[in-house]
C-alpha cells in the first residue's frame, strides 16, 4: 500500500488539490462576491494547481463582514461622543451650507456622516505640501515644538537617513517627557528589532500593525495599514502619500519622486486623532490603551475657515467609505474631474462613473506614472486605458519620475488628498485615509499643481494606443485577470 502511494503521490496530490479547489469555488459562488474577483480566483484555482489555493488563502478571504478587527469600542468614550455630537451637522445646517457653498457636494457630506459619523469641520487651516523633502522639513519643525503628545502611524518607516532623523527627534521628545506613540505596518516597514528596542528604551510606545507570524500568515498578509498619519498635541495633523523613507525625498534618492501631502490645523485634526486611537486600540489592546482626556482632544483656537471631512476605510468599516466618496464626487461633478494616482486599477463602479461623466460632457483627466514601480500593476492599469480613451477621458503619463500623489480635484470647489490609490486593494482591502476638502482656495492650489504636473506629461492618443505592440496587449490581458489581487 505504501509503495503504491509513493508511486502515485503526484496523482493523489493533484486529486486532493482539485477537491479542495472545488470546495473553495463552491464557497466563492455561494457568497456572491464581485463576479470579476470571483472569476480571478476560480481561474487561479483551475490553472495553477497548489499555487491557486495559496493565492486564495493569502488574498481571497474577506473579513469586512466578519469583523475580526475589534476597533469599535474606542468611540464609546463619552468625550468622543460629545465631540461628535457637537460637530455633526443636522439637516437644517446641511441645507444651509448646501445653499451657501456645498451645492451638489452635500450628498458627499451626508454620505460620510452617515457611513462613519465623520463630521464636516470648518475651523481648519490646510497647507498643501509638494514632495517628501518639503513635507519632512515642515513635519520635523512641528515635532520639535510638541508639548504634550506625538502620534505617528505609517505604512513605511525605513531604517535609512530620513527614517533615522525622524526616530532621533521622537526619541529626544520622549526623553523630554512627551508621550510618543508609533504604529508601523509590519510588512511595509520591516523595522529591525534593534531599532525598535532603541525606541522603546527612549520611552517611545511603539507597536507593529498585524505582525506576520506563521500560522497566521495566510489571514494577515492581505490587510495592511497603508495610512500615513501624524498628530501633534491634538492640534496639528499630517496626512497624504509620503512615507518615511529616503525613497520619497528628492536629493536622497536616484529617481525624482512626485508626491502630495497635507498639513492640517483645526477641528479636522480631531478626526485624524480619532482614527489613530482606533488603530492604537487595535494594535495594543488593553495593555497600552490611551486615556482620552482634554489633552487628546483639545479646544481648537485656530481661526481657519477651510471645510474638511476625513474619510477612512478598511476591513473594520461597514462600507467602502473612500471608494463611495470618490464615486459620489465624480457623479456630482459639473465641470471637470482631474485625478492623479500611481496605480489605476479601478473597480466597475468607479470605471463606469468616470466614463459616464466624460461622455456627458465633464472634462475627465487621469494622470498616471509613465514608469511605475510594479510591472504587473503597470500592465493591469494599461488594460483599462483604451476604454477610457474611447469615452473621451484624457489620459496622461507623468514622465519626470515616479508619480506617487493620490489627489482628485473637482469643479474648483472640492478636492481630496490622502493615502488611497485608485485600485481594488485601497478600496477594499487595506486601511486608508483621505481628507475631503470643500474649499475653492485649496482646490485652486491643487489645480495649479495639477496643471504644472501636466507639463511633465505626455498625453496618450487613442489611435496610437490601439497600435501598441501585440505583446503588450497580451501582458495587459494577463495582468488584468489578476487585477483584484494586485
Image (cartoon, grey):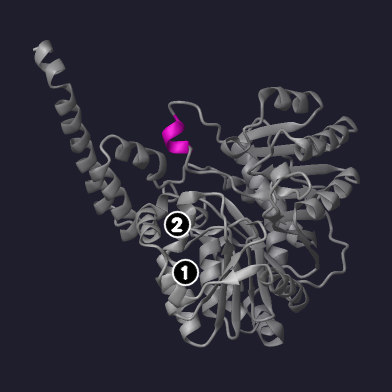
Tell me which numbered mark, 2 or 1, is placed earlier along the sequence.
1
Q: Is residue 285 visible?
A: no
Instruction: Between residue 365 and residue 458, name the one nearer to us.
Output: 458
Judging by the rendered image, the residue that carries numbered circle 1 is: 350
Q: Is disc 2 in contact with disc 1, using a CB cutoff of under 8 Å? A: no
Q: Nearer the viewer, residue 29 or 235?
A: 29
Q: Which residue is mark 2?
A: 379
Residue 88: x %, y % from top left = 67, 67
Q: Nearer the viewer, residue 187 or 378?
A: 378
Residue found at x 8% / y 12%: 1
Q: Is residue 274 left or right of residue 20?
A: right
Which residue shows up at 73% across the image and 67% down it? Answer: 121
Is 310 within the magenta? no
Q: Decide: is 400 above or below 46.
A: below
Q: Nearer the viewer, mark 2 or mark 1?
A: 2
Residue 450 numbered mark, or none: none
The majority secondary structure of the magenta stretch comes to helix
Horizontal and vertical percent position of residue 81:
67, 56
Amino acid at each position: 500500500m505504501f509503495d503504491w502511494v509513493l508511486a502515485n503521490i503526484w496523482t493523489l496530490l493533484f486529486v486532493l488539490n482539485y477537491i479542495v479547489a472545488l470546495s473553495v469555488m463552491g464557497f466563492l459562488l455561494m457568497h456572491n462576491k464581485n463576479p470579476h474577483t470571483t472569476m480571478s480566483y476560480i481561474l487561479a484555482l483551475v490553472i495553477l494547481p497548489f499555487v491557486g489555493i495559496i493565492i486564495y488563502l493569502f488574498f481571497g478571504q474577506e473579513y469586512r463582514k466578519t469583523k475580526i478587527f475589534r476597533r469599535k469600542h474606542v468611540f464609546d468614550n463619552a468625550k468622543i461622543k460629545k465631540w461628535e455630537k457637537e460637530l455633526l451637522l443636522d439637516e437644517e445646517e446641511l441645507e444651509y451650507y448646501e445653499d451657501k457653498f456645498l451645492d451638489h457636494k452635500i450628498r458627499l457630506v451626508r454620505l460620510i456622516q452617515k457611513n462613519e459619523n465623520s463630521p464636516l469641520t470648518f475651523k481648519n487651516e490646510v497647507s498643501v505640501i509638494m514632495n517628501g523633502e518639503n513635507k519632512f522639513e515642515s513635519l520635523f519643525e512641528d515635532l520639535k515644538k510638541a508639548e504634550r503628545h506625538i502620534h505617528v502611524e505609517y505604512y513605511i518607516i525605513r531604517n535609512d537617513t530620513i527614517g533615522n532623523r525622524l526616530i532621533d527627534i521622537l526619541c529626544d521628545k520622549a526623553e523630554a517627557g512627551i508621550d510618543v506613540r508609533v504604529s508601523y505596518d509590519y510588512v511595509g516597514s520591516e523595522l529591525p528589532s534593534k531599532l525598535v528596542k532603541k525606541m522603546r528604551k527612549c520611552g517611545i510606545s511603539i507597536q507593529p500593525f498585524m505582525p506576520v507570524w506563521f500560522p497566521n500568515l495566510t489571514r494577515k498578509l492581505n490587510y495592511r495599514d497603508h495610512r500615513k498619519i501624524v498628530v501633534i498635541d491634538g492640534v496639528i495633523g499630517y496626512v497624504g502619500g509620503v512615507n518615511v523613507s529616503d525613497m520619497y525625498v528628492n536629493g536622497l534618492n536616484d529617481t525624482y519622486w512626485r508626491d502630495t501631502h497635507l498639513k492640517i490645523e483645526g477641528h479636522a485634526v480631531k478626526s485624524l486623532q480619532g482614527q489613530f486611537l482606533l488603530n492604537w486600540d487595535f494594535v495594543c489592546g488593553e495593555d497600552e490603551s490611551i486615556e482620552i482626556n482634554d489633552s487628546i482632544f483639545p479646544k481648537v483656537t485656530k481661526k481657519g475657515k477651510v471645510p474638511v471631512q476625513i474619510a477612512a476605510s478598511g476591513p473594520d468599516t461597514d462600507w467602502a467609505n473612500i471608494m463611495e466618496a470618490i464615486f459620489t464626487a465624480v457623479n456630482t461633478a459639473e465641470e471637470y474631474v482631474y485625478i492623479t494616482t500611481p496605480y489605476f486599477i479601478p473597480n466597475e463602479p468607479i470605471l463606469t462613473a468616470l466614463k459616464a461623466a466624460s461622455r456627458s460632457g465633464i472634462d475627465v483627466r487621469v494622470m498616471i506614472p509613465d514608469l511605475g514601480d510594479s510591472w504587473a500593476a503597470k500592465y493591469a492599469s494599461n488594460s483599462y486605458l483604451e476604454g477610457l480613451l474611447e469615452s473621451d477621458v484624457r489620459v496622461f503619463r507623468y514622465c519626470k519620475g515616479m508619480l506617487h500623489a493620490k489627489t482628485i480635484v473637482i469643479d474648483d470647489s472640492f478636492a481630496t488628498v490622502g493615502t488611497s490609490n485608485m485600485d481594488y486593494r485601497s478600496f477594499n482591502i487595506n486601511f486608508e485615509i483621505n481628507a475631503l476638502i470643500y474649499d475653492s482656495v485649496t482646490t485652486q492650489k491643487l489645480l495649479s499643481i495639477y496643471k504644472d504636473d501636466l507639463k511633465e506629461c505626455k498625453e496618450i492618443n487613442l489611435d496610437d494606443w490601439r497600435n501598441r505592440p501585440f505583446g503588450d496587449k497580451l501582458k495587459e490581458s494577463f495582468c488584468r485577470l489578476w487585477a483584484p489581487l494586485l
